[in-house]
Amino acid sequence: MTIETRITLNCAEEHTNSGKNITGAVISDYCVVDTETTGLSKSDEIIEISAIRIRGDVEVARFTSLMHTDIELSDYVSDLTGITDDMLKSAPDPQKVITDFVDFIEDDVLIGHNIGRFDISFILRYTDLRNDYIDTLDLAKNTLDLPAHKLADICEHYGIVNDQAHRALSDVIATNKCYQLLRAEPPLEETPSKKAAKKSTCSDDTKALHTLQGLLIGVTCDGVLNEQEVMTVKTWLDQNKHLSDRYPFSVASTEIQKVMKDGAIAADELDTLLNVFSSLIDPVSANSTADVSSELSGKLICLTGDFAHGTRAEVSDFLKSLGAEIHDSVTKKVNMLIVGDKGSETWLSGNYGGKIKKAMEIREKGVDITIIKESDFYRSVIGEEVTP
């Protein structure tokens, strides 16, 4: 499923993106864009947006603004960005900021780090976009042989100083410097083994499940579900019955069959399906338990995502010090899957990771496996959120 399709589904029929990913292009006139948000879910909002206009590879203008929100920021977001609730109380109205932002970028090609999966999907919650874009994350993955390709990793590779990382204006300035260096890099040679590995990581079934995920996001993003939207999902399920034993297909299909057993869908049944579909979009939040035993001796634990309490290796060492055993993959023997609060680059736009899908499939078969967010785990087991 393409990035463009996922973005459109994420915003249902209200706002669309008619631009395309032109990451392979080399240009010298463009706008660099970055957003900071309250979180990663479809209910989160932009709290800061910035852009710089580039002409002939030289900055000629800047746009930056905080955006008002009534969502209380988590400690993690405030610590990460340096933005506080008090700063946002007097910030401008979001729609006014977005209108000014759209006037600033005009028809320019947009450049950003993970812009295709993240920034554009958030901007589309406020307005349509027609701009083509270049994603420096994709560009870096295609040109730099690094263990990770976050903006901080690229800056470190090139020796670029980002004085206020995770503030939108500072990030766009750093991203622009990275882009001008990345576009001069030759593409990495792709060995046959790498090609095979890349192909195997996204099978046709996986792409189809991503499509289902996007469809569920699309029909639920306005918080209301109608019978026509249910029938749209049902039609897709009927056309893809070869996925009947896969999560989230199995749950969506079973629940629709339940409510349609009598040939009609009542209002309370639509509410039930809305809750089910919403839980399938974000199964971690829907299934994370906030209460687990502090006795971890002999427990088999699997980790997924990026962690706020340290690297995955550091978190693993911490769990081992409590007597737990770490397992690299999700199996029926695993007792607990801990999901990092910082998520993963691949989880945006509904694609929340193979380990989580596998854990949900195992749970659907009656196997007891605990799924818990990193913050819930530390709060329950340690009593406070401390860095291991």
Image (cartoon, rainbow, N blue to C red):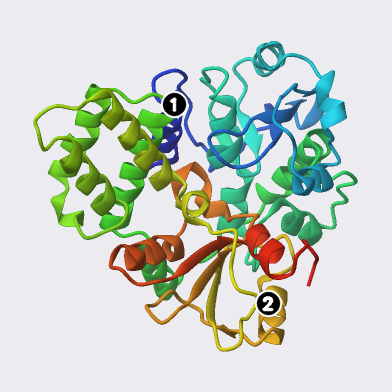
Q: Nearer the viewer, residue 277 or 33?
A: 277
Estimate the x, y position of residue 87 in percent, counting from the top left: 86, 27
Amino acid tagged 2:
Ala
Q: Nearer the viewer, residue 388 or 101?
A: 388
Quote the CA–CA distance across marks 1 and 2: 39 Å
Amino acid tagged 1:
Gly
- What residue did someone put label 1 on? 223
Observer able to see residue 306: no
Q: Residue at x 61, y 49 (%)?
A: 137
- What residue did someone put label 2 on? 313
Q: Residue at x 35, y 65 (%)?
A: 363
Q: Is residue 38 left or right of residue 58?
A: left
Please tell me in which quadrant of the rendered image residue 257 appears. Answer: top left
Question: Vertical placement of 233 versus 312: above or below?
Answer: above
Please tell me in which quadrant of the rendered image residue 298 appears. Answer: bottom right
Estimate the x, y position of residue 349 in percent, counting from the top left: 48, 42
Question: Vertical placement of 263 versus 203: above or below?
Answer: above
